[in-house]
Each structure stands twice: as C-alpha cells, then as structure tokens.
Amino acid sequence: MPEAISRETVAKVARLARLDLTDAEIERMTSQLAGMLDHFRDVDALDLSKVEPMNQPIPLNNVLRDDVVAPSLDRDEVLASAPAAQDGRFRVPPIIGFEE
Amino acid sequence: MSTAKQLIDGWELVVGLEVHVELATKTKLFSASANRFGDEPNTHIDPVTLGLPGALPVLNRHAVELAMRLGLALNCRVQPCTFHRKNYFYPDLPKAYQISQYDQPLNVDGFLMLPGEVRIGIERAHLEEDTGKSTHFGGAEGRIHGSEYSLIDFNRAGVPLVEIVSRPDIRTSEQAKQYVSELRAILLAVGASDAKMEEGSMRCDVNVSVHKPGTPFGTRCEIKNVNSIRAVGRAIDYEARRQIDIITSGGSIKQQTLHWDDAAGRTNVLRTKEDADDYRYFLEPDLVPLAPDTAWVEQVRSALPPLPAVRRETLAKLTGQSKESEAVAVVVERGQDAYLAEVAKVGGDAARALVYVQQAFAEEAASPRVPAGDLAALTLMEKNAKITATQAKTLLAELVAKGGGDVIALAKSKGFEAMDTSALEALVDAAIAADPDAWAKFKAGEQKAMGALVGAVMKSSKGKADGKAVTALLQAKANA
Amino acid sequence: MATRRTVIDIAAGVSSGALSASAVLEENLAAVDAREQEIHAFNLVTAERARERAAQIDTDVKVGRKVGRLAGVTIALKDNMCTRGVETTCSSKILAGWKPPYDATVVRRLADEGAVFVGKTNLDEFAMGSSTENSAFGPTRNPLDTSRVPGGSSGGSAAAVAAGFAAASFGSDTGGSIRQPAALCGVVGVKPTYGTVSRQGLVAFGSSLDQIGPLSSTVADSALLMEVIAGHDPLDSTSIPQPAPTLLNVLDQGVKGMRIGRITDMPEGSSPDVLARLEAAFDALRSAGAQIVDVQMPSMSFGLTAYYLVAPAEASSNLARFDGVRYGLRVDAKDLNLMYGATRAAGFGDEVKRRIMLGTYALSAGYYDAYYGKALKVRRLIADDFAKAYEKCDAMLTPTSPTVAFKFGDKTSNPLAMYLCDVFTIPTNLAGHAAMSVPFGMGEAGLPVGVQVLAPALGEAPMFRVAAELERNA
C-alpha cells in the first residue's frame, strides 16, 4: 500500500469531494485517515494476485425495462422543495472558473 | 496515410471525432420519463432524472436495441458490457455522477467508409446518459463567463446517448465533414436518432493535432460542441493552422480543451467542468452487466435496413451516375431512392428521374406524392424528345404541385410539343435575319452574342423551342 | 417488560374484527408519550396520519372490505426510507425538512397490506455508525438502559420495538445496521439476502451492500414481514427475479439433522458473557438434534478492511448528489463551487465527512488499485470462504455484536473502535448472504445478547428454522 496520507492529499481530496474543511478539520482528518489506512494494511499479508475482484454479490445480468412512458413528477411539487427556483427551473449561483 | 497534397506545409493533420448521439427512444435511458425535445422545462422528470435520494436506474431495452443497431451499422462487434459511474460535480448532472461505459463498452472495433475508399476506424460506440441543460444569465451572449446565475432544466437529463469515438484516422477537414455527414446518414437510415445538430441530438467534439509524417502524433487539442458540419470543417482548418503556426514559431502545443466560436472564426481556450477533475470511475453497483445474446444481436443485424453506402451504389448503378455524385447522395439522404427504383421499374428513364427528383422533390417525403408511373411517363416524354428540357421542368413543377397527373394530357393542354427540325430552322433563320449584328459577332467568335439569338428564337417559338437544339443549329450554321 | 402484541396477533385480531386497529395504535402512542422524550427513537411521530389509517382499516374490516396481511400492524420506519409527503431526513441536517415526492417500494408494499406507520426512526446520519450517536438530531437511548446506546445505525428502529412504540420496525443493514442494534436492544433483526428486498426508495449508502429488513419482538413476526416486503421489484435492477420466500411454515420444523457451523478462527475480542451465550446457543441446537460442525473462515477478519474501503467508496459517490442544487440544505455563496463546499460542510456530520473522504481517496487516481481494487478482491476471498464453509454446514452461528450495549461516548474517540462493533456482521454484507440476530439470554449488567444466524444466499428458510429453534430455547 502507498505511504501514509499527507495533509496536502487530504486537502486535495476534500476539494474533489466539495467539502470545505477548516484547517483544524484537515489536521484531524489527516491523522484519523492515516490511522485507518494504517489498520487497512492488514490485507497486505494476503496474496491477491490471482483473485478476481467482486463488485456485486448476485450474479444477475440483462435486467431491462420496456420503453413505455410514465407520467412525470409534478414540477411545482418538486420545485417547492428546491433551494432556489425561477421560471420553472432550478437556480444556482454563477458557475465561475468554467466555460461551456 | 495522407497524400502529398493533403499535407499542410508539410504537416500532417490528425483528427479524431467523438460524436454524441441522442437515441430516438420514447423514454430515458434509466427511467420512464419521456424523451422529448422542446417542451416546457422540468416537465419530464422523475426520481432518477432528478437524482433524488433512493432512486435507482433501470436500463431501457429499446435504447440497447438502437445502440446495437447503430454499432452493427458501423461494423462494430457487440460484446458483453458493463456500466460505470463517472463522478464529477456540475449542476446539470443530477446525481453528481454520470452513468456511462468505461472499459467494457457495448460496441467496439468498427469502421466507416468515406468516398474514395477511405476507411475510418471506430474504436467504440457506448451507451451513457445525457445531462440536463444549464442556461446562464448576466454574462455576455449567455456564456458562463461573467454570469450572475444559471437556471437548470432536467428534461434532457437521462436521455439515452451513444458516444461514437473514431480512431484518429481522419487526415483532412473534408474527410471530417464527410465522416459526420455519413454518420448522420447511417443514424437516420437505421432509425437510431434524428441526428439534428441544430437541436443538439447530434454533437461533435473534434480532436486535432499535427505532426510531420513519420514522427509520433503531436499533442492534441479538443474542440467541443461544434454544432454544424460546416463548422466542423472550419474549426479544423483554423485549429490546424493555429497549431502549425505555434510549432513553426518555436512554441509547443499545450493539451487544451477549446471552444469553437463560429462567428469570430476561431477557437478559444475553455476550462471545462471536466478539466482538473478525477472521475474516480468504478463499476455502477445499481446496474447489472449487459450481455446481449447471439440471437438478439443477429436479429438486430438481420433487421438492419440497407445502409446509405449500399443504397448509393445501387442508385448509382441504376442511374449510371457516380456513387459519389451529389445527386445520388441527396436522393439517398432523403430516402427517395426506393421511389426512383420504382420509377425505373415501371419503365421510366432512371438518369432523368434522378435529375427530376433531386431538383424538385426537396420538400417531398421519402415516399413522394407523385405516382412513380407519372414521373416515369414524364422522363420518357423528354427522352423521346416529345418535349424540351425546359418544358419538362414546367411539367415537373405541375406534377409536384398537384401531387401527380397525366403528363401527356398536361403537355397537350399547355401546347407543349417539341418543334420539328425544319420549323425550328426557319425560326433560327428568321432570328439571324432580324439581328445581323449579333450574327456577325457570333460568327466572329463571340460566344456571348449567341444569347440574343437564342432568346429571340425562344420568344418567337413561345417557349416551344428546345434551347439545346437552337444552340446546335446556330453553331452548325456558323461553322458552315 | 410487559408482553407486547406481536405482528401476527395484531394482524389476525384486526382482520377478524376482534381487535381494533385504532386501539392497538393508541397503546403504542401511549408508550411513545410515556418514554419517547427520554429515548428519542423517532425523528418524527406521524400520529395523525396513523390515526386516520387505523380508523380506515377498522372501517374496512367492519364493512367487509378486504384488508391486507398486516392489517392494523403498527410499524416504525427508519428515516432513510422515502415516505411520500413525510419528512425523510436520514438524521442529517442536509435533508432536514425534505419531503420525498414518492414512496419506497417497501413502504408501498407495507401500506398496501394495511400497515399503520407510527413514525420515522432515528439513525446514525446516512446509516453510518454503530450506535446512533452520529445522528444530527441527537442520539437514541437504549430502552433497557438509557445510559447506553441502542446500537446503530438503525438504533431508533430497534429502540422503537424494544420500547413498545410499534409492533415492529424496519431498518437498513449495510455492515450490520439492523442486526447489531437488534442484538443490543434485545429484539429480532434480519438482513435479507442481497437482492431479496427492493432498495428502491432507500437512501443509498453502500449500494452493493444495503438491504432493508425487519426488526420485531419475535422470529415469526419477522418471517411474516419478510413474506410481505420481499420479492422482485422491477424498479430495482439488483432485485432478484423471484417471489418472496415462504417462511412462516418452516418455523416449526426444528433443526434435527441440520449442520450448524462453528467458525473456529472467527475474530477475537468478544466479551466473555457474549461468548458464553453463543456456547449456550450451540448447546441448545445440539440438544435439538442439530450437528455442530467446525468450519474455518480465514479471511473473515479482513472483512473490516474490505468493508471500510468498499462502503465509503460507494457512499462517497452516493452522497455527492447532496449538493444544494435540487433539494435539501443550501448554504448560499458567491459562486457554485463555494456553494457546494459550504453546503456540504454545514450539512454533513463528522462521521459522514470522514467516510466521504476515505471513499473519495480510495477511488481516486493512483489509489484505486491499492485500496478499492484490493478491497474488492478481499471481498471475493470472503465470499469464497463462505462458499467452502457452506459445503459443510447449512447455517452458522456467531455473536452478533462482540459486547452487549455499551455506554454513550465509550467508542466515539476513535472511529476504528466503533468499526470493530461490526466485525461479525460485515462479512455477510460483503458476500450478499442472509443473516439475522436472535435475542438469546442476558449478558453483563442484565443486558441482552444477540446470537447471529448466518445462511448462504437465498437461505432464509434454513436461517429462520434455526432462529425459531433458538427462540424456543432462549
């Protein structure tokens, strides 16, 4: 397994996860994650070279649905739960830093 | 491999295209909301579309069928496949991940033929869900930059897409345009999509790089969302030049994502939602693998209609035209080739019919209203010189306007009959006599002077004269 | 503890007219009035709706209309199951006040059979925890000793049954979140085979691990509830295409001739009182005619590592949708990214943030193979261990929890200490098998001990047979 997780990595992961962590939180998170990841080294003892990953516990495949329209949710009901709505749409603050 | 004349100042252009196509299903890829364009915002929504907590995706069988049709029409191999989550944050992405296909896509290893027997490899054509639509307010031209807020409509979120990824086999902007055009024709032919670039049901991202032949490929830039075939050509031409200029002046190409500004005729750097993000792909736990059995694949394959390339060949043989001619391409694109075959079958002249259909049937459906027999009759009248080309055109317009008719009766009612040669010669002589100046100039070699004489004959014949025959007569007399 | 009405008795009584659904409900609501302030099993008590429903059922019975298999049965639902028009918060600030526009499939099936919903129960935020101390709305207290935790994450659901607030409840189990609180509160708790019960409408935590399951005071009650909620759901692609298992009719079959596995290399660290009860459970089954067989599960102790990489990875993706755009909390900010960051920082508690961070890291570029990828392989090893073990036995027994209910704050200083609570329950989720906890006597301080019955995938019938036998001998 890789080396112990660094503060910089934790800060990067927090950005990736869109979590604003305070400096104190990043400190604490770094040591807690490092502790956990250290514990997880126990699996290094296993020989996994010939083992296939198991993503799903049940061997199903080809689950499909007919192409039949079902009624939409009511827009007013949905937008009533929205943090901000305008003109029948969800409103968000400006998306700076990106272009489309 | 580029021919010498395809190189730009000795540089070889390398282009790959990623085309996203919206499938023509009734419902979305993973939920039963309607797949419709242009309706009031947020009127085709459900828990899956909105990414509500607890919502689960269920795969649309018809989307799989259309994706297979598309893949097989592109000569791909259909294989067992899986779905992955592509994780990133953006307001038009309701779950903050897109369900797509990653290392095991549905269709792989196909190809598409361009005119001149040019083969463009298709790496993959996989299924994924579309995002919603963001509209930005407060910035210039509705762009994100400088905007004050954005409004999101989720009608499009979850619409089934197939992403078709070409290999970087394209070497000219013309080939790129042909690729998009042919791809579109195939999509329409198999009924997979209505492929309307102007409505966004077909979107092109263009990857461009340049290199000196014999050297490794250069760094490529991606131009996103180029929304017309013409823009594809222009964007590639511009970008190739931009890259060549940078390299030849000692610079190097940075791998960037670009936006094509068609009005300004240039590319601009974008920092898109996908830059600087790590997608953390992992297998979608809410879906199970998709492994279409051989029976299904073969059923789809055998139900494929004849593809545009085959239909163009057939029409070309029928009409004696080149399979790469515009008339053949246009008529096949409109789906009117079957009609033309019918016209030939009932005895019509196929070559003439091709011209008529190309010129006058633009507004007609794949099955035009004019009965094949009527059109056949018209072709024969012109072929047998019973009417002139000009008269045929007039009758054709009548047929289209009326949705058919008895061409012989129509011709008679208009007094259309081709003039016999001696009557025609008399009119020509009269015109010469009436305008000795023009005759003299024409005899002296001024081709332009013929116009006045031909015009005079057309007038005196009340349009019955065949312009071509008049010209031939004048020429013969001048040479005599 | 007064004898409470069972699900089976209520359903039989109400549908025959002998019992009034409204009267049954009032008994539960009286218990709520008496102790809910102290216990805090619920985020929301839906008394008025429940009264309307109970009255409706009584009317239906009176006029001879058909009523369902759960007529008048009072049910509490874990607050991560979507209930249309009724707040569903996952005990998180990020969903405080959110009312889903749709019902979970399980909720619909229960309602269709005449269940009366008493309310939405408290949980560790987003089902992440083993003590319900991670709820953003305050912990739930163990009704048997209010200085102790009820377990988690379905602590509220377990407490509701133990305290008589409802005849039965439903929870969700990703790494033990039904079974462990059931054990700590002295009730029955079932995690069905993965794919047996629909996950549609269950707010996802670990998608390849989650299952909804019942908590009840008797094994038979859980059997009936399983018959009602299980079975194929076309809205869940991971739903097994089979009808619900029939379980009520196996309960009296006994265990004669069954082979029960004892895992000789199971993880250490259980307290002696728990181990003593486990022994007594083996003795009881042996006396009842079962054969006890030694089996080995060499990879079992690696389950914790595999689980604490797989589950947070899936969770980090599942919880990304809580971004302040379409529903739930939004903390306004100058631009979108600031809004995301501020909303999620304010909306999620520490444990949730920790697991999102762990999961994001485990999936990130350069680390996938070392963490998530590796964990999926360990998962395979554990599944293989189970397969080998089940060649030699029909079911296995372990403790459900290494200890009886612990005191508040005992395990909150070190996240790993809390994770160890699930060492016996996690492997079943990884393999996708079935398991249930059955109360089997008392341990330290007079607190209940739960014995876990494990069975292979779709082995609910043998599992319930064993459970019923244990219950007879408890």
Image (cartoon, rainbow, N blue to C red):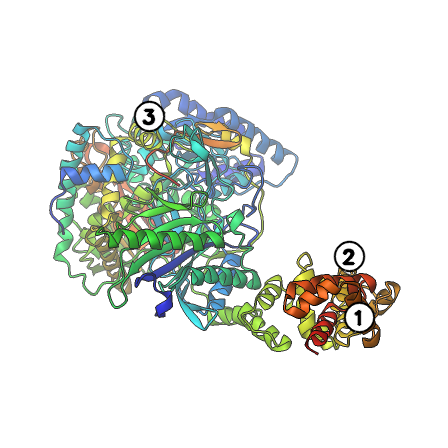
Disc 1 with disc 3 on a shared chain: no
Looking at the image, residue A51 lies above or below residue C207: below
Establish if B331 lies above or below C321: below
* Residue C328 occupies quadrant: top left
Q: Identify which residue is drawn at 54% across, 56% down.
A: B193
Query: What number is the disc on residue C137?
Result: 3
User: Quick check: can you spot residue C373?
Assistant: yes
Q: Could you say where residue C258 lies in the image, as x and y percent from the top left?
A: 31, 60
Please tell me which of labels 1 and 2 falls first in the chain: 2
Residue at (50, 63) in percent of width and height = B182
The answer to whether tags 2 and 3 share a subunit is: no
Specify whether B16 is left or right of B388: left
Q: In the picture provided, is C422 more to the left or to the right than B465?
A: left
Callout 3 crowding tier (Cα within 10 Å): few <14, some 14–19, many ≥20: many
Assign the N terminus of chain C to one quadrant of the image: top left
Q: Chain of mark 3?
A: C
- Identity of the residue drawn at 21% across and 65% down: A50
Callout 2 amino acid: Ala
Q: Which residue is mark 1?
A: B429
Assess disc 1: are there few (<14), some (14-19) or many (≥20) residues with their C-alpha within 10 Å of its C-alpha.
some
Amino acid type shown at disc 3: Phe
- Per the image, label 1 sits on a secondary structure element best described as helix
Helix, strand or loop status at disc 2 = helix
B80 vs A8, nearest the viewer = A8
The answer to whether mark 2 and mark 3 are in CB contact below 8 A is no
Q: Chain of mark 1?
A: B
Q: Residues within 10 Å of mark 2 (few under 14, many from 20)?
A: few
Which residue matches tag 2? B401
